[in-house]
Amino acid sequence: MAESPSAPSIARVRIGEAPSLARIDLVSSARRVAALGAAFAAATGVALPCTGRSVRAGEFTVLALAPDRWQIESEGPPGHAIAALGAIAGESGSVVDQSDGSRAFDVAGPGAREVLAKGVPIDLDAAVFRVGDVARTGVALVAVTLRCLSAEPSFRIVVARSYAESFLEWLLDAGAAYGVLRERHSASPR
Amino acid sequence: MRIPCPFCGLRGHEEFVVDGDATVTRPAPGRPDAPTAAVRFVYLRDNPAGWHREWWFHAFGCERWIVVERDTVTHAVGRVWSAGDPAPGEDR
Amino acid sequence: MSARPGAGARLADGGLIDRTRTLRFRFDGREYAGHPGDTLASALLAHGVHRVARSFKYHRSRGILSAGFEEPNALVELGEGDARVPNTPATTIELFEGLDAQSQNRWPSLRFDLRAVNRLFSALLPAGFYYKTFMWPAAFWERVYEPAIRRAAGLGRASGAPDPATYERSYGFCDVLVVGAGPAGLAAALGAARSGARVWLVEADCRAGGRLLAERLAIGGEPALRWVEATVAELESMPTVRVLRRATAVGRYDGGVYAILERVGADRAQSAPFEPRERLWHVVARHGVLASGAIEQPLVFENNDLPGILLAGAVRAYANRYAVLAGRRVVVATSCDDAWATARDLLRAGASVEAIVDQRPAAARGPGAWAPDGVPVETGWLRRARGRDRVRAVEIEAASGRTRRVACDAIAMSGGWAPQLQLATHLGERLRWDGAAQCFAPESWPPDLSGAGAVCGEFGLAAALAAGARCGTGAARALGFRATDLVLPAVEPDRPLQTVPSRAARAVRAAFVDWQNDVTIADVQLAVREGFAASEHLKRYTTLGMATDQGKTSSLNGLIALAEATGRRLEELGPTTHRPPVVPVTIGALAGRHRGRHYRPTRLPPAHAVAADLGAVFVETGPWLRAQVFPRAGDRGWLDAMCREVNTVRRAVGVCDVSTLGKVDVQGADAPEFLERVYASRIATLAIGRVRYALMRREDGFVMDDGTVARLGERHYLLSTTTAGAVDVYRHLQYCRQVLWPDLDVRLASVTDQWAQFAVAGPRSRELLGRLVEPGIDLADPQFPLLAAGSVRLGDGTAARLFRVSFCGELAYELAVPARAAHRTLERLFEAGAPLGVAPYGLEALGAMRIEKGHVAGNEINGQTTAADLGLGRWTTKDGDSVGAVLARRPGLADPQRPRLAGFVPVDRAQRLGAGAHLIALGAPRDAAHDEGYLSSVAYSPTLGHWIGLGFLRRAAERVGERVLAHDPLRGRDALVEVVETPFVDPRGERLRG
């Protein structure tokens, strides 16, 4: 059972900017979403996940944000992902580059859940928000996309670029009592 | 109040924006009585003490519009379904 | 446990205090000492300090009444300076080294309080006196009477300074929330936790145990506290269990949501680093178990508020938990068995019990009502306590009618126990009187809440343990966990409490019902005489139960008095509705981190740092920070900077960051049709590679937002919205897509943050952009005419978009680049533009220029104006369905009397205009009946050299050239203005075409 240490000597949470990734919205409509699903499965061998889940399809990590909207993370350059996804989607889905529009922060360590509980209004218990689960919610009045990356536990939080500095300040304040190790990733976008 | 979003699960009402009465439907365009129908649609509302249907937008969530059955007296939440779907148990 | 003579009131041994350490503290400037485990109240009592306060209205001396958070009297100001916290119950403050507290509501001192003179006028100051007096002259109320009355009465003083403490909020989720860690709560938590359910146990006190901390009871043949400790240890060893101490469940809300206030660093010496003073938990529990116990009620008799008169259970708590004697010659007065234990515990501690006065005849008492031989026992009531600042004697009226006086230095009184059912009623549940248990109970428990122990009238230890265990395992099973019944250690069988609510005293002024608000029996009877005979009316008329203690020790006696005064039975009356919070909650805890700068998040455009480096002054536009002006050395103020920026744009070239405007990407086979229906303007005729200004209406026909629509491809559009309207417009678009026309193939994506956007405006703007774009791109007029839109590549490879739109009326473009490129693109613009005389411009200049051109913005599109009002009727002429089309054609909206947009200049060109001024015809009275419109936007025009304004005026088109009065009562600055046509500058739009 967790307890805030009075003078953290060991960092119980690591907070850092996620590696720079291409981030593409794949959006459809009620009429075309079934066709999009079929096309995606045919091209990748993987079904588009249902809202709240994520799945790996080759070089893509696909996050389901809504019944007709997915966000794809990819390590390569955005142009490549856009072209590939556009080819897959064809007429049944639109591909919109959001790589510049957001920033992502990774929160990991034994204190990660306690830190996030200060602002995340959903249940992050390991049995409820499992590895690969995705949730869009609001944290400290900022819309976020939250994903459970691993059982360490570690989480990735994506926020709109304009909110990122304000949100990061909240995140670091929330973690201060738990001893934050601030990590810097090599390719943090600015 | 907690609202069971059909896509995101049970969430606090703070994640939503409420828009109002979901029992009224936008009149089809071109009706002969279009002005009267439009006034009814935009302005006239029943105000029941009891079960009611409302439009809620999951702003901090999936950004879907959903219909929420809510008892305006007890705040109990009943069935919830997505825009574009029929109410559970009813046909379109 | 025995008292050493002459050693004050601290007993030589016993108590849950750490006698190996001494803590020094100050109260009203005097130094005292206590031990860890003491409260401020117990430590003061240990020194024989009983008088700790002056009452609210009459400034009567008051002492400590209780040993818990129900304390109505012993409220102190804790700390000093801007950290001073008023109205803190001394009974809940854990003693710490260096504690500094002050009594309240007395001047100049507690001992000698000048305002005690109020009691001489007490006949004039009963409940509700301010409804009947101090009425004339009317003006005096606000200026004279009310301030005087406020100063004469009250509780503590707020520091008046910003709260220096930090607060936190946090979320929690669990299966079973148990409120209260007394025997019932511990058993419930254990029963639920062993099944594997996620259990939270919250306890308001600093340690678990509840009543067990104050009593000398045994569980399993051992002191009860051993079982408490073992249970807590087991609970804390489970990773699925969370035990929170110093945490009060203050509210229960819909959906299983509970608010829990945790006093983390409060009432302690130094907070640990990063520790908040308080933490407010928002807990979602699938099932709640209420084990919040009961609170003992006082007896009502004359002068029952003298220091030295305490609740009987509190006297036991002070003796057993804190090793403090509340008095040495004590009279015990009661209407239930429970208080007899006080007499026994006092005797064991070496005090003398002068009498036990029980309201019930001997036959009506239960087996718990026994005392050692030699203790005088009477059947009767307390009639009047005597003493000045401490009780010295009490008059006892026997059932036979005989009265005798007994000398004493303390009275331990008990009017029975009232269950703390607040959480069970927060959602409107009703209480009814349970005659068997002689207390209130819920008419029914909601499906996700159950109760156990004293809160349910189960006052005995065995009953509490059993009920708690049942509730805990029952809750776990109801949630689908497999719970085994809890095997409880043996306890003595309970004896029924046999309590009856105390009889109300005769009407005497000083028989107090509500200590904190100085409400007496006489006030209750006065209220009934005046017709306020319902419990809710009684409460509000007398203020009984409305103080910070919210009636915890007063509402039951108030109801009893009301029943007697109206000749009704308690069963017919209902207690008043209780609403959250159960105890006072610091405003800071509600705010959490959202104060000051952190009140809401701040949004920054991608190139914010560049503007900051250029010395911009920023202004908040909603959550965004936008550059307002870019001052330079030598500017006399913002006006100078704004004029310079406008002149630069109109003569050379300027750059403005407009990234904050909303941008929505719209695609899909039916995108053109969708946009045609969403906008009031015609979209279907927009060609690829073109952008147009468009209006969006609400369904009621009024304009919602304005912006642009650019067609980037056959079925690919990019919409822009105002900064303020972006979120609402996006939601509205989703509404149209999902609710109104779900069969259309339309896909939306908000790309506001994906793209940075800069307005590049002025005669040299084309030249400047020419230096940025890839060589070979021709921006000359035929290739890129007015309202062209398309993708361009910049010289550094950035894939940008260019739109030829102008808000300021000059030759202008808007350049959009992916946010990653914003910083370097903006720097490149200033670098390349330096020889052209480029300068940045901000919102002030932007605003002045658009007003010069007569363009409408948020001040005009205020939700009350139609396209016709705005002079934009020609942007809404189309047939076919679109949002708001039908009601926009309402006859009422075509009324020529509706104010329409026009321009205004001051007749005296040197005069300043004020937005919000109302337009009155010359010579007409300046009142609402003659109000013909208002000024919506004003600016100083650097181009014209005087102030100009946009506004709405009835029949404006016919009145060009007329002079009207701009009446500004708020600023006291009227101006004579002339109605003119807009634009003010370059009326034929020649500069636009560059």
Image: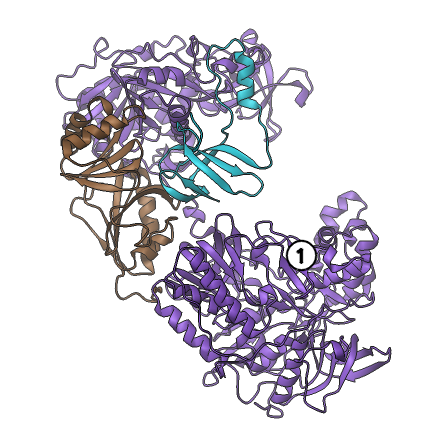
Of all chains, the one bearing label 1 is C
Quadrant, the N terminus of chain A: bottom left
Q: On the rendered image, what quadrant is the C terminus of chain A found in?
A: top left
Q: Position of residue C83 (x, y in %)?
A: 50, 62
Residue C257: image x %, image y %? 48, 51
Of the pair C663 and C715, the residue shown nearer to us: C715
One can see residue C30 in this view:
no
Which chain identifier belongs to the brown chain? A
User: Where, by quadrant of the figure, is residue C610 drawn?
Assistant: top left
- What colour denotes chain B? cyan
Residue C283 or C805: which is nearer the viewer? C283
Q: Nearer the viewer, residue C361 or A139?
A: C361
**Residue C88 image point, x, y percent:** 57, 65
Residue that carries the numbered disc 1 in the rendered image: C432
Colour chosen for chain C: purple
State whether residue A20 is above or below residue C580: above
Query: Which of the 4 image quarters holds residue C279?
Result: bottom left
Q: Is residue C330 above or below residue A2?
A: below
